[in-house]
DNA sequence: ATCTCCATGTAACTCGTTACATGATTTT
DNA sequence: AAAATCATGTAACGAGTTACATGGAGAT
């Protein structure tokens, strides 16, 4: 039996709980060992489609995860002045991830700048609102195209026939949500544009 | 007592640009004069549907907006130990809001904890994923019901026949997006649940 | 020559959440 | 008697962004 509860064994003040970003990093590292640089890429694409951040937030968070025993690192010579570190998830890290998934989620923390602008749009000329929506439409159309291309190649490889214990199946579920979201947003943009006087 | 510190005509050191929350507050104040307390309510419902925050962030932000001359306040006796302040948008504030709407938006800043959990769900038993989605489904179903009730009463009052220069029309646009979003999310939850082994 | 990619970090700041603090009036 | 509502603020901390800093290898 592994000495499970991780972290500092004799620490009195409890360690800071793992942040959402921490879980995002853990989830990525659980796929395969990666560098901080690679994680920064993943947090633009594909994880970035639902959880974005910058590399400046990643490196300190990796240190925290390692201090908590949820990941371990091995370092070798790097391309720059500092050594390159490759992180691997520990059993404790996987256990923490599993526990987090099962814990009730907080819904909320919504922040949508487009809807905020639309909410205030009665103050501007209809043509300004029209351009605002048209710009959003272009963005969501481009994003949808990207997702659909991935969806097509994922289906080609039979990803939709995989089981829920395959990481690629989980990827597929989030990708489909991306497709639905962009489609919904596009349809809403079109509806608004139709409603607006020419 | 009205204080009107005008919008720093010749100030050299540029003041901090207005934050997204600042614009949310400005947009609400533009409807009618309100207190900080009332703004806190609006930032749960209905503005909170796309821009949430706590009252502890509102009061300092209101001070900043007033120092920038975008809103003014009048104070009278309050129910508690401190005076009650009612804020009103200035012409400069409305101009700033209009300029912000016309400026190009940054899309992004996505943070979706459910999708993050789903992304890592290959690590857990399918039953855990099932419960995760079922919980989300309940939440989105409840939220959809709320939006639909509002949508029905809004249509009864003929809000869908108003023009884009009426604030209630702008409210209606954001409400419809809420309905679409929850419906899309519900459909995705159902799709995942069907895909999962019983 | 310049640009991009790999790779890692820190500094300074703003944004956002939780908890603390007060107190009258109204509702349960 | 207890709780909710109205009403305003501060303190402490965690989360997130932008800018600074370094430097080799390979491509244009």
Image: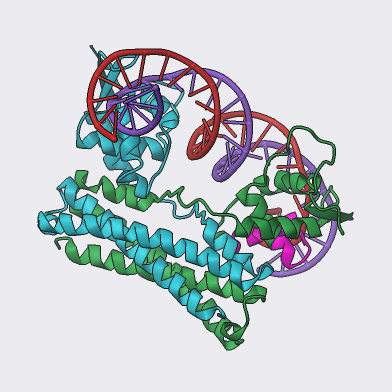
Chain colours: A green, B cyan, C red, D purple
- The image position of residue A177, as x and y in percent, is 47, 69
What residue is shown at x 28% (from left), y 39% (from top)? B27
Residue B3 magenta: no
- The image position of residue A191, as x and y in percent, is 24, 66
Question: Residue B162 sits in which quadrant?
Answer: bottom left
Res B10 seen here: no
Question: From the viewer's perspective, is residue A83 above or below residue C22?
Answer: below
What residue is shown at x 86% (from left), y 51% (from top)? A83
- The image position of residue B119, as x and y in percent, is 60, 66
Question: Residue B2 sits in which quadrant?
Answer: top left
Q: Most prominent secondary structure in the magenta stretch?
A: helix
Residue A42 magenta: yes
Res A138 seen here: yes
User: Which quadrant, please, contains the C terminus of chain B?
Assistant: bottom right
In the displayed structure image, the side of residue B198 where residue A41 appears, left or right? right
Q: Nearer the viewer, residue B42 or D5?
A: D5
What residue is shown at x 27% (from left), y 48% (from top)? A119
Q: Nearer the viewer, residue A125 or A12?
A: A12
Outermost residue to the right: A76
Question: From the viewer's perspective, is residue C23 above or below residue B48?
Answer: above
- The image position of residue A87, as x and y in percent, is 80, 57
Q: Nearer the viewer, residue D2 or A92?
A: D2
User: Which quadrant, please, contains the N terminus of chain B?
Assistant: top left
Question: Residue A95 sits in which quadrant?
Answer: bottom right
Q: Nearer the viewer, residue A166 or A82?
A: A166
What span is colored magenta in the figure? A28-47
Question: From the viewer's perspective, is residue B63 above or below residue A37?
Answer: above
What residue is shown at x 36% (from left), y 45% (from top)? B48
In the displayed structure image, the side of residue A118 where residue A157 appears, left or right? right
């Amino acid at each position: 039996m592994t000495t499970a509860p991780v972290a500092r064994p004799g620490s009195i003040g409890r360690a800071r709980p793992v942040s959402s970003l921490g879980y995002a990093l853990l989830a990525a590292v659980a796929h395969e060992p990666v560098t901080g640089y690679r994680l920064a890429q993943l947090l633009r694409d594909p994880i970035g489609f639902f959880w974005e951040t910058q590399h400046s937030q990643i490196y300190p968070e990796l240190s925290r995860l390692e201090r908590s025993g949820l990941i371990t690192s091995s370092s070798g010579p790097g391309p720059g002045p500092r050594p390159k570190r490759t992180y691997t998830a520990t059993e404790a890290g996987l256990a923490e991830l599993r526990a987090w998934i099962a814990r009730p989620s907080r819904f909320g923390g919504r922040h949508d700048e487009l809807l905020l602008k639309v909410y205030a749009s009665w103050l501007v000329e209809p043509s300004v609102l029209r351009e605002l929506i048209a710009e959003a439409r272009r963005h969501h159309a481009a994003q949808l195209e990207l997702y659909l291309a991935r969806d097509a190649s994922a289906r080609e490889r039979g990803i939709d026939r995989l089981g829920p214990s395959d990481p690629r199946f989980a990827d597929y579920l989030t990708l489909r949500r991306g497709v639905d979201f962009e489609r919904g947003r596009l349809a809403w943009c079109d509806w608004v544009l139709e409603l607006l006087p020419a």
